[in-house]
Amino acid sequence: MDAKIKLTASTQELLRCPICKSKLILSDCQFICTNAGCKAHFPIVDGIPVLINESSSLFSTDDFVNRRYTFFRPSSRIKRLMVNLLPAIDCNIKAKTNYEKFSELLLKENKNPRVLVVGCGTAGRGMQRILSFPSIECIESDVSFGPRTALICDAHDIPFDSSSLDGVIIQAVLEHVVDPYRCVEEIHRVLKEGGLVYAETPFMQQVHGGKYDFTRFTRRGNRLLFRKFEEISSGAVGGPGMALAWAYRYFLLSFVKSKAARALVGAFVRLTSFWLKYIDYYLIDRPGTLDAASAYYFIGRKSNMVLSDRELIED
């Protein structure tokens, strides 16, 4: 274990017990809950606090102490080679612009905003834009050790004080959690009044997280998920062309089983369908795309109002 924590001292002050939400104190290279009825201990592994509520998480503290693979596993050399050499079939058309807008909104409210990034073992598509602002502190968390992970936590029990954060980013994560509604409730809780959320969720995508893949969202389903937020902007980030390429890939994969055969199919699909994503540059803002998108985005502001069911379907 390493006493040198990757989080800033001011961010450490905002950390709370993921079990009872009480304050934590740092002692002997671990965080200890100050609640006499809880007194849970949370280790620090390679400078990364592991703040997991084991009673409600798919993961255990031992997973991280013993450095077991959780969500991510290292790719084979063949797969890495294919990813680097062959054209991709997916394309996030809106992320860069969305992060630009999200950053501007954050900086209007606070000169030095603090943003929790949920699921950021590696940087998401377009995230480089917000990471380029030195005045925005991004707290990068995940349920897996990755090159960017600074905090291990589960979105079902976010280990931060209520109303303590200026923004939360949750990109391509909510399909991989058991209860996305609880996770969004937690996001709402930790945000300050008027705090901002940026989310991306899939619609027309096949299983891509193995056993950690649970849910898909229509556009209205996505809006329902964030019904306690005032909508600033929403729409598709991946269009019908990307959705078609994914369907084509998984159609062909359904015929094969071995890793070698699946790798060959993956390479064939990349070479024969990569061009479909470029059609989305034309389709992405067309009304019909909202019913056929590969994925959606939502930028919202924490609100005291709750979007009613009638308002949802009249949108």
Image (cartoon, rainbow, N blue to C red):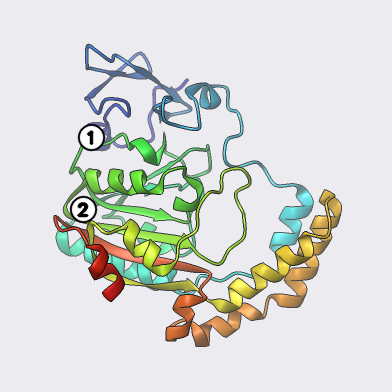
Badge 1 element? loop
Q: Please, what secondary structure does the residue beneath circle 2 have?
A: loop
Q: CA distance from mark 2 to mark 1?
A: 15 Å
Residue hosting label 1: 14
Pick the residue in front: 236 or 131: 236
Looking at the rendered structure, which numbered label has been put on residue 112?
2
- In the picture shown, does residue 144 fall above or below 246? above
Horizontal relation, residue 99 to residue 301: left or right: right
Q: Quadrant of residue 7?
A: top left
For image coordinates 47% across by 45% down, the residue present is: 177
Given residues 301 and 292, the one toward you in this image is 292
CB of mark 2 within 8 Å of CB of mark 1?
no
Quadrant assignment, res 13? top left
Which residue sits at x=51%, y=50%? Answer: 122
Which x, y percent locates residue 110?
16, 56
Please state which amino acid type lies under the numbered disc 1.
Leu
Estimate how packed mark 1 is, as few (under 14), some (14 to 19) or many (20 or more) residues with alpha carbons within 10 Å: some
Q: Position of residue 258 (x, y in %)?
A: 85, 49
The quadrant in which the C terminus is found is bottom left
* Residue type for callout 2: Asn
Q: Residue 58: in sight, yes or no?
A: yes
